[in-house]
Amino acid sequence: MASIGHVMMGMAAGRLQARRRRELVGSMALFALLSLAPDLDAIGFAMGVPYSAPWGHRGAMHSLGMAALFGVALALLGRLVHLPPLRLGLVTFLALAGHDLADAITDGGLGVALFWPLCNRRFFLPWHPLPVAPIGLAGMLTRRGLHCVAVELVAFAPFVVYALWPRRDHDEKTT
């Protein structure tokens, strides 16, 4: 995926996490960044980690187990900073699991290690509507890369609509 869709899903997760309107921008920014976390495994390319290795791209970092681990970690952190831990943990899990599943509906690559550490096998979901994006900025500026961005902008538009839809806080007085 071209990461545009991941960011758009992260914005929606941030909206889901925010309890008040004044928290929206910070929450959406935080979850937009967090939604990119599984792709930190791409650093492995520069370090000689093979794509197909458990810690290669779309490997362990893209597993549902890792999404759960991050969810628990952020829930514990949420307790320390007085955020609802269960909500923060669940939304974190959803944001990261969403990244994994979005990558599993692309039409290329080796698949996603959804069930690591239980197994190293990589999976695709049965439906592949998203073209796999080239890795790196130079690849994204090609015709193919720009096509991937355009497809993601359309496919993930509902997430942005949800994220940016006007909302009222429950504690606001109606007039």
Image: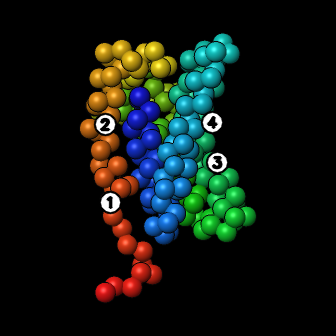
Q: Which amino acid does label 4 sit on?
A: Pro
Residue 130 appears at what percent x and percent y? 32, 29
Cα–Cα span, label 3 and label 2:
29 Å
The quadrant of the image that shows the N terminus is top left
Rendered residue at 35%/56% (across/down): 164
Residue 3 appears at what percent x and percent y? 44, 33
Q: What label does residue 153 carry, if any? A: 2
| Tag 2 secondary structure | helix
Please name the residue that numbered disc 3 is placed on: 69
Cα–Cα span, label 2 and label 4:
32 Å
Please name the residue that numbered disc 4 is placed on: 117
Mark 3 or mark 1: which comes first in sequence? 3
Colour option used: rainbow
Choose mark 1 or mark 4, whichever is in front: 1
Choose mark 3 or mark 1, whichever is in front: 1
Mark 1 or mark 4: which comes first in sequence? 4
Residue 47 appears at what percent x and percent y? 68, 16
| Tag 1 secondary structure | loop
- Height in image: 86 above or below 124? below
Q: Are marks 3 and 2 in contact (CB under 8 Å)?
A: no
The quadrant of the image that shows the C terminus is bottom left
Mark 2 or mark 1: which comes first in sequence? 2
Mark 3 or mark 2: which comes first in sequence? 3
| Tag 4 secondary structure | loop
Q: What residue type is labelled 1?
A: Trp
Name which quarter of the figure residue 134 lies in. Answer: top left
Rendered residue at 56%/35% (across/down): 38
Choose mark 3 or mark 2, whichever is in front: 2
Q: What residue type is labelled 3?
A: Leu
Q: What residue type is labelled 2?
A: Leu
Please name the residue that numbered disc 1 is placed on: 165
